[in-house]
């Protein structure tokens, strides 16, 4: 079966892929055990699945939950299909389910917010989104889907008190200020909070996502370097962890209002700091 799989994101704990199956064979595939936990979100087409002998329909209105150990096989009665695949490593899964990686049984259906969210993930990748942003969005979508199966367990890992939430936000800010190139999983591990709950409490406390806060730190560093006369924008983009120069230009323009080249010209036209100091008032 011609399968085109494009890996959009791969970290220690997350995998996001854009998959297209063209000209599938007739009949059922061989029975094979599932080796990972994940979600399959069909964007186009229809698939029939058998899991431990029980049939289910996979279409754009449903989410297929792949559970490790399940004996599964598939057929493609309407031809090819296109889908988004999300795979979670056990530690990430446990962090989303209150410390226990076992997933309860049940069906998950695709609501409009879910249908939009997994398409936005692919769109953000095409638009130059980096791994931190994609990881934050994938984690939020996975938590949303797991919340349909076990809402109490997904909520269980949230910092309970206001003081604990403030502490988590302050620690996340400190970790990112120390090194804004750290990934989401590393930041959450250093803070001691799951990526999902850290993202939620951070947005509630600051009014912005972790991604936007991190981008603000990187843009501030870019402005400092431009003010110092940095000429090599490609090198600057690489050192600040942007996907490429175009990605840095997009983020800088979004947050600072002008592209890096214009900002460099503006900043280089300013007099030295000591000349810009306000003179003391006359007595």
Image: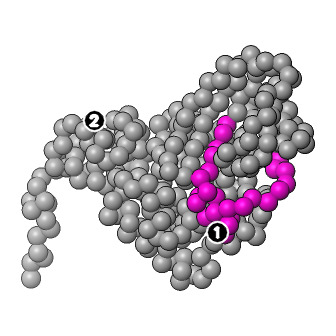
Q: Nearer the viewer, mark 1 or mark 2?
A: 1
Q: Nearer the viewer, residue 237 or 253?
A: 237
Residue 168 lies, with reference to residue 93, above or below; the image says below
Q: Could you tell whether 261 is left or right of 83 in the image? A: left
Q: Nearer the viewer, residue 131 or 50?
A: 50
Q: Nearer the viewer, residue 202 or 159?
A: 159
Residue 234: give its label. Answer: 2
Please name the residue shown 38% across and 62% down the image.
176
Residues packed near mark 2 inside 10 Å, few (<14), some (14 to 19) or many (20 plus): few
Of callouts 1 and 2, the N-terminal one: 1
Which element carries disc 2, helix, strand or loop? helix
- Is residue 193 visible from the viewing direction of this image? yes
Which residue is depicted at the point 83% across and 18% down?
Answer: 26
Let me know if residue 107 is in the magenta part: yes
Specify the color scheme.
one colour
Classify the position of the N terminus by image quarter. top right
- Which mark is drawn over residue 99? 1
Left or right? Give the position of 223 relative to 206: left
On the image, the x and y values in percent for residue 38 come to: 68, 47
Res. 98 image quadrant: bottom right
Q: Which quarter of the figure is the C terminus placed in? A: bottom left
Residue 59 in view of the camera: no
**Residue range of the region highlighted in magenta in the rendering:** 84-112
Indicate which disc residue 259 carries: none
In the rendering, at what x and y percent does residue 4 appear? 62, 24
Q: Is residue 187 above or below residue 223?
A: below
Q: Are marks 1 and 2 in contact (CB under 8 Å)?
A: no
Q: Is residue 158 left or right of residue 202?
A: right
Instruction: Kindly identify the residue that appears in the image at 30 percent across and 41 percent down.
Output: 238
How many circles with numbers are drawn on the protein?
2
């Amino acid at each position: 079966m011609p399968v085109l799989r494009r890996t959009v994101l791969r970290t220690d704990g997350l995998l996001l892929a854009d998959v297209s199956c063209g000209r599938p064979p007739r009949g059922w595939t061989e029975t094979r055990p599932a080796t990972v936990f994940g979600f399959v979100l069909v964007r186009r087409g229809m698939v029939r699945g058998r899991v431990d002998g029980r049939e289910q329909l996979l279409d754009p209105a449903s989410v297929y939950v792949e559970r490790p150990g399940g004996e599964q096989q598939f057929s493609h009665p309407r031809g090819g299909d296109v889908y988004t695949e999300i795979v979670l490593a056990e530690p990430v899964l446990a962090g989303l389910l209150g410390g226990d990686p076992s997933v309860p049984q049940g069906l998950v259906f695709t609501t409009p917010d879910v249908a939009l969210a997994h398409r936005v993930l692919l769109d953000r990748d095409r638009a130059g989104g980096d791994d931190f942003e994609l990881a934050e969005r994938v984690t939020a979508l996975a938590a949303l889907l797991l919340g349909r199966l076990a809402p109490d367990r997904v909520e269980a890992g949230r910092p309970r008190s206001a003081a604990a939430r403030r502490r988590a936000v302050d620690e996340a800010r400190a970790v990112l200020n120390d090194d804004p190139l750290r990934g989401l999983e590393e930041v959450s591990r250093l803070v001691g909070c799951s990526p999902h709950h850290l993202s939620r409490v951070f947005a509630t406390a600051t009014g912005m996502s972790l991604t936007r806060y991190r981008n603000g730190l990187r843009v501030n560093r870019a402005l400092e370097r431009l003010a110092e006369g940095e000429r090599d924008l490609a090198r600057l983009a690489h050192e600040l962890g942007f996907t490429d120069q175009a990605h840095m230009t997009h983020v800088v323009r979004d947050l600072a209002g002008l592209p890096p080249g214009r900002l460099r010209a503006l900043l280089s036209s300013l007099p030295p700091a000591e000349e810009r100091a306000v003179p003391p008032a006359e007595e």
